[in-house]
Amino acid sequence: MNRKQRRTLTAIFQKPTPSNLQWRDVASLIKTLGGEIQYGDGSRVRIDLKGESLNIHSPHPQKELKRYALRLVKELLTRTGDTP
C-alpha cells in the first residue's frame, strides 16, 4: 500500500465523514486490499472484498463519493478488518 492509499484509508475513518474523497482513490485502495470492483448498469458498482460485498453507486458527474456511500465503504472495511 502506498502513501496515498494509506491517507485515503485514514480519511475514510475520520469523524465527521469527509465529503471530498474521490472515487478513483477509494477504488485504488479497494484493489490494493485485494478487492474486485465490477461496474454494472448506469453507475452501479459492486465491491467484493474478502468474502464481503457491497453495492453502491459511483459518483457522476462529480468525482467525489457521497457521504452515505463512504459510510458504507467504511462499514465494509471494518467487517473485513482493514482499518488504519
Image: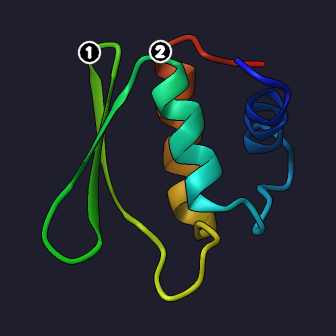
What quarter of the picture does the N terminus occupy?
top right
Per the rendering, the mark at residue 80 is 2
- Residue 78, x across and y down, in percent: 57, 22
Q: On the image, which quarter does residue 24 sit in?
A: bottom right
Please give left or right for residue 20 compared with residue 63 in the image.
Answer: right
What residue lies at 60% left-to-right and 74% top-to-bottom? 63
What residue lies at 59% left-to-right and 84% top-to-bottom? 62
What residue lies at 51% left-to-right and 45% top-to-bottom? 27
Q: Which residue is mark 1?
A: 51
Q: On the image, which quarter does residue 23 sit in?
A: bottom right
Circle 2 crowding by C-alpha within 10 Å: few under 14, some 14–19, many from 20:
some
Please give left or right for residue 23 compared with residue 53 in the image.
Answer: right
Please give left or right for residue 47 compared with residue 40 in the image.
Answer: right
- Residue 54, x across and y down, in percent: 31, 42
| Looking at the image, residue 7 lies above or below residue 82 | below
Residue type at tag 1: Gly
Circle 1 crowding by C-alpha within 10 Å: few under 14, some 14–19, many from 20:
few
Helix, strand or loop at disc 1?
loop
Residue type at tag 2: Thr
Residue that protrudes farthest toward the bottom in the picture: 61
Q: Are marks 1 and 2 in contact (CB under 8 Å)?
A: yes
Mark closer to the chain start, 1 or 2: 1
Q: How far apart are the two marked residues, 1 and 2, measured between alpha carbons? A: 8 Å
Helix, strand or loop at disc 2?
loop
